[in-house]
Amino acid sequence: MALAGREFAVLISAALGIWVRDGAPCRDGHRWSKRTEFHHFVHENATLRDAPRRGCARVACALTRLWGASMEPAGPTRQMQSAGLPARLWGTTGPPERLPVSRAWFGLLLAMASAAHADEATLHDNAERIILETDITFDVDDVGAMAVLHTLADAGHVKILAVNYNEVHPNGAAAIDAINTFYGRSDIPVGVYRGEFPDPDASRYLDHVATFPRRLTADGAPDALDVYRRVLGDEGERSVTIVSVGFLNNLADLLRAEADLVASKVRKLVVMGGRHNDGFNLVRHGLLETTQEVIENWPTPLAISDYGGRVRTGATLADTSADNPVREAYFRWFGGRFEGRSSWDQVAVLYAVYGAGEWFKDVASGTGSLRNGYSWQLKSGWRTYVGPKRSEEEFVDLIERLMVEPPRN
Ligand SMILES: [Ca+2]
């Protein structure tokens, strides 16, 4: 990279320093500073409020990462890539070292010359393609999981293909659609379960969230199986990750009807449920045998995730805007105040997007079991269990930030 010589870089830095001035407001409330928060600008590339600068930052981020791998193998860029997470997710571990200024400024120059905006489709080329299965009704961490997914979609790390609902509350699909709409994605398909479902749960928040702007009517959502057929049919071979943070009834229907479609299009399934003797997602509403059927026969790798009970998040939603349905859900769930709630579902979503790495490890020895005595052997690349690699405090910080980040658009 002889062209990115020091003198040239200093010259460009000076020019860009005038354009992207110190103190420019970022969406997360920070002020950008060339000296102290360069990483904040380049790698937290969706934070600047100003759209042209934000677009340039995204392109610069990609260029810097591309060059960073070859120019400085041991540098912080490599560390970020191995983590697989945006810099904002480093949380309480502190920011990484600042990037070499010459390299990063040179990236900015080319970004300005080539494009003012990064196209969303381009951002999604390498994004994890996710379908969320949620029982968003009783507990509120499903809402937090949706917020996390949307923020990661804003960062270009996720493409949300569909959200399917496996409970039967009449306002469940409407509330899901209201959350999607708040984040600017009212086009996401929402499918619902329409089979037998004994003892459905009441909800403290769905009726309230459903009053927020949305596209769907309360009973206008298609069957979840139809959504799976259509969405999976359009996707590439073994390209889709399904993350279930609720019951497995929709997935059992899918498996019975379209096993070949699952085997060909799904890459992995992540299930939020207890590894041993689960008492909620894997057993309630008469679904214990259904759960066994899915775990026994699912034709792709399947990971069980049950971490997050003491990772309490959502309290700082109080500081977000009143038009935020995620804020409303947590407010109603706590009976008119803001507190932190367990984050089982957000953790499962994070693992679904990033897999084993800086934050998680795959446990592939031992067993898992259900309350009916069925047990399965853990095996690398087939049936695994999600183990956390960071502290509860680090998970709280990470998830809290992702949940309160305002929508990009
Ligand atoms: Ca849930």
Image: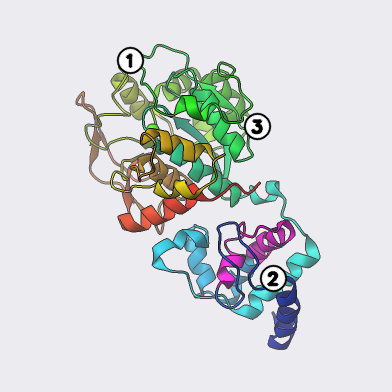
Q: Amino acid at mark 3?
A: Asp
**Label 1 to label 2, Cα distance in Å?**
57 Å
Q: Which residues are magenta?
A: 37-63
Neighbourhood count class around disc 1 (C-alpha, 10 Å): few under 14, some 14–19, many 20 upward: few
Tell me if label 1 and label 2 are in contact, CB under 8 Å. no
Tell me if label 3 and label 2 are in contact, CB under 8 Å. no
* Residue 187 badge: 3
- Decide whether residue 195 is among the magenta residues: no
Quadrant in the rendering for residue 342: top left
Query: Farthest front residue?
Result: 336
Q: Relative to 392, is 366 above or below?
A: above
Label 3 vs 2, first from the N-terminus: 2
**Label 1 to label 3, Cα distance in Å?**
31 Å
1 or 2: mark nearer the eye? 1
Tell me if label 1 and label 3 are in contact, CB under 8 Å. no
* Residue 107 badge: 2
Q: Give the image location of residue 368, x and y in percent.
A: 25, 36
Label 1 vs 2, first from the N-terminus: 2
Name the residue nearer the viewer: 140 or 9.
140
Name the residue nearer the viewer: 124 or 369.
124
**Quick check: 139 left or right of 3?**
left
Q: Amino acid at mark 1?
A: Asp
Neighbourhood count class around disc 3 (C-alpha, 10 Å): few under 14, some 14–19, many 20 upward: few
* Residue 199 badge: 1
Q: Residue at x 32, y 20 (%)?
A: 287
**Which quadrant of the rendered structure holds the N terminus?**
bottom right
